[in-house]
Amino acid sequence: CSATMLPEQITFELGDGCSITMKPDQITLKAGAATLQIGPANVTANVDVLAKGISLVNHLHTKVQPGFLLSGEPLGAGGIPGGGGVLP
């Protein structure tokens, strides 16, 4: 039985600026100026990502308290997190 050494990465290129690079723990897709990386702990992109037509960058939330604080769990009745009600 013999072992075969595989390359540390394989890149497929098509035209100018379009490629797929595969490493043991990461896949990188490039198309023009857009880059998408899929790794063991996360997925990153340098452009907006749409999921079922909803923008990751520009989507809005409902039932949150206005102000300067960071967002969190939606507020329920009386401003209580997870209260299940609707803010006045």
Image: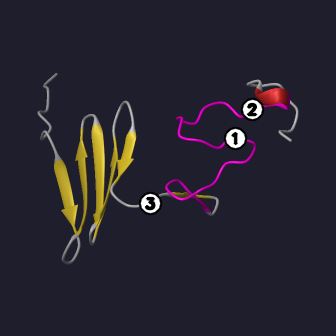
Label 2 belongs to which residue? 75
Compared with residue 14, is residue 45 higher up or lower down, i.e. above or below? above
Q: Do the residues labelled 3 and 2 touch (CB within 8 Å)?
A: no
Depth-wise, is mark 3 or mark 1 nearer the camera?
1
Q: Nearer the viewer, residue 83 or 21?
A: 83
Q: Does the magenta stretch include residue 44?
A: no
Q: Which of 1 and 24 is in front in this view?
A: 24
Q: Nearer the viewer, residue 22 or 79?
A: 79
Q: In which quarter of the image is the N terminus?
A: top left
Q: Do the residues labelled 2 and 1 touch (CB within 8 Å)?
A: yes
Which amino acid type corresponds to the residue marked 2 in the rendered image?
A: Leu
Which amino acid type corresponds to the residue marked 1 in the rendered image?
A: Val
**Residue at position x 64%, y 59% in the image:** 52
Disc nearer the start of the sequence (3/2) = 3
Label 1 belongs to which residue? 64
Separation of marks 3 and 1 at Cα, in angstroms? 23 Å
Mark 3 nearby-residue class (10 Å; few <14, some 14–19, many ≥20): few
**Residue at position x 73%, y 25% in the image:** 81
**Residue at position x 60%, y 32% in the image:** 72
Under circle 1, the secondary element is: loop
Label 3 belongs to which residue? 48
Q: In the image, residue 13 lies at what x, y percent?
A: 20, 67
Range covered by the magenta-colored residues: 54-77
